[in-house]
Amino acid sequence: MRPGMRALAGVFVLALCAAAWWPAAPGASPAQPADTPGHDYPVQPVPFTAVHLDDAFWAPRIEINRTVSVPSAFEQCELTGRVENFIEAAKALHGEAIANPKLPGYPFDDTDVYKVIEGASYTLSVHPDPKLDAYVDSLIARIGAAQEPDGYLYTARTIDPQHPHPWAGSQRWALEKVDSHELYDLGHLYEAAVAHYQATGKRTLLDIALESADLLTRTFGPGKRSIWPGHQNVEMGLVKLYRVTGREQYLELAKFMLDQRGPDGSPGSGRTYNQSQAKILEQTEAVGHAVRATYMYSGIADVAALTGDAAYVRTSDIIWENLVSKKLYITGGIGATGRGEAFGADYELPNMTAYNETCAAVGNDFWNERLFLLHADAKFVDVMERTLYNGLLSGVSLDGKTFFYPNPLESAGQHARSPWFGVACCPGNMTRFMASVPGYVYARRGTTIYVNLFAAGTAEIVLDGGRRVRLRQDTRYPWDGHVRLAVTPDRAGEFAIALRIPGWARNEPVPSDLYRFLDRVPDPVVLAVNGARVPLTLDKGYATLRRNWRAGDVVDLTLPMPVRRVVANEHVAADRRRVALQRGPLVYAAEWPDNPGGRVRNLVLPDASALTAGFRPNLLGGVTVITGRAFGLAYDAAGRVRKTAQPFTAIPYYAWANRGRGEMLVWIPRVEAAARPTPWPTIAMTSVVTVSGHSRRDPRRINDGEEPASSDDSASYFDWWPVKGASERVEYAFRAPARVSEVEVYWYDDTGDGEVRVPASWRILYRDGQAWKPVQALGPYGVERNRYNRVRFAPVTASGLRLELTMQPTWSAGLQEWKVK
């Protein structure tokens, strides 16, 4: 290491742990500031270990994460073989036979364990737990046993059950760009290792990570082999290792991987899916897999801050502007489509099929926090807060036991959280993020304290010059907009407190024209010091109070919280003539248990309908609800639309799906022409539907009355994928025997990017007593896409119908809707 880097190493080892992603050495005072390195973020976050929340909103959630989510995630890692993978890897390393049949089926095994270790480490930082500490130690021992002498970590990804021997030499990482994910795994290992070192002072996992990283730096870089990760994250992990050790080669390799990314002609390159369609500095919009993208954008910000690369900063800013102005959901979610878990085109923001992966919300907040640290601009915190309270928090249930992978903005009842997933990236991400929330509340720069988020609790902050300031924040936020900040410096003197005035309190839902409020709030934001009102002068979204502070000074901030109606840019087709509701930082949703008939997708909420807010302490852990009057629309037997006035209730979006499956709606029609009247119950809709075989899909989508827009409409369908070339069936059991003579079938077919096609053939049978008999069809059985295929047959009286189909030889099959007349 060069002498200059030795000096930086000392700085980094003594640097304070700002947010969870900003490492410091154990034993360093959590509030002790370091001299600024040659290049770094101009603003530094106050570490989560120096912020102690005792509010009624975040503190209970952080405790549930510690006592429920983290242990549950570790249990799932054990039950699904993720922990056993390391044992099997160690066997393979020593030439022993391996027998774990689960290895090929879980491509993210190692990453899940690393993320939960990271989350557990954060909890150990603030709440010592000998039992958890010992368990994590046992996991680390298993990981270490699977590492080769040169540092190569032998994992589930590199085990071939037929040839259980590590890849060697040039074979290692050979498939990285086509998504073998080894570098992605290592990135999460490095993050977990730094977190564990910070929390416990133990070097066990850190040494494993450093040996691995040293192998990477010996193998890749200028004048060596070229590589970039198929799934980004290793860049952030390498930066964390750089911060905790001061070893310049880790930062250099992170930048090298970013610089090398692009259409280099290798397998997997040149794709928008993994953001390799162009060189980093040539990219101008958010594209491809949303999680990979935000992890990469976060890595770009880290490298830009630590190298002073202005071109990287410009690239990050340009991409951010594209995302916030054209690709951001009102909930802060990102990634519109499940096809590639990716960003869609500009203004492509569907609601029912919105993907909005929980991990993408986490990545979005990582990125926006870093951009704030670069620019000291509240607009980035505005986006971070919107995501945090809505599209991220919805990813975990109120009891901390189940999780969402996608986070849609509309549901017909097909969505529910799950305790775990085959690819279980989201639960682990939630465990590590929830534990670190206090680290996003405050930041500092020189002699200025930034108050970014509002939550009751205390913070100990050290400013340049060594002045120590204790802050005590009291608030019921997000239910109430009053914030009181008691300021206690260790000695009287001048410094500044910059309070963020949220965009939603300044009549700006997001920092772009993607969304706007229908009205303007007449009540002003009020700021007072020691009871005396002070002028509100904003700079980059902050009201800065620079004065001589002394113990006992009190700041009062009042943010008006009326119910606001939000409308989308006209280019967002899915939201035209619709309105979303917001109060404070929270977006609201109408959900089935709170509205008449258990339906909300048939609602119309006129602009003139008065809306009020009220707190309900016994509902969903205590929430403020929005109530008013709306209209419910429904078809009658003659096909006419009937309109009925009814009470209306909306709950915070994050709290939906905690009371069972059912309808949910964020964007509510303002006019009848935009509404979806409840269909009149038909023979098909009132039938009990069953299917043969096994499917991940709910067969009730076949007779739910949803009209598909096309054969590849993914809003509400059923398929048998991944089964291919088979014969399957669907059966309707009628509520009562009926005389029928016609069916209409709309096939699901995802030609272009999927493996489901219209069937090779099909037929209809009717139930006569206990026997199934073919109907006498009066025409061909059609298999056309993007339309109903109607078949008339000789009338029969039956207690049910059966649809039998045969798939095309190399394809699966599915249905959008099956009608009976």
Image (cartoon, grey):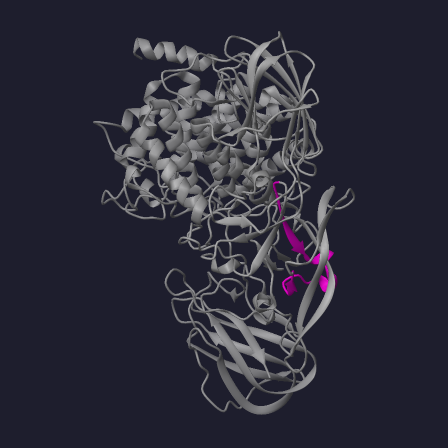
Residue that sits furthest to the left in the current view: 223
**Nearer to the camera, 155 or 640:** 640
Q: Total number of numbered labels?
A: 0
User: In the rendered view, does 461 fall on the left or right side of 320?
Assistant: right
Residue lying farthest to the right in this orientation:
618
Q: Is residue 27 above or below residue 303?
A: above
Residue under the image location 46 percent in, 32 percent down: 188
Any part of residue 94 in sight: no
Q: Is residue 747 above or below residue 6?
A: below
Pick the front one: 761 or 429: 429
User: Which residue is at 36% across, 10% downward?
Assistant: 6
Residue range corresponding to the magenta coloring: 585-605
Q: Is residue 240 above or below residue 572?
A: above
Residue 437 seen by the camera: yes
Q: Quadrant of residue 89?
A: top left
Residue 80, picture quadrant: top right
Instruction: Determine whether 407 is above or below 558 in the image.
Output: below
Quadrant in which the N terminus is drawn: top left
Residue 357 % position (x, y)? 51, 47
Give x and y (percent) for residue 422: 52, 48
> Is residue 599 rendered magenta in the image?
yes
- Is residue 675 covered in magenta? no
Q: Quadrant of the C terminus?
A: bottom right
Residue 695 rendering spot, x and y as whole percentages: 54, 62
Residue under the point 46% across and 76% down: 787
User: Which percent across, then down, holds residue 371?
Assistant: 44, 32
Query: Which image quadrant is residue 298 in?
Result: top left
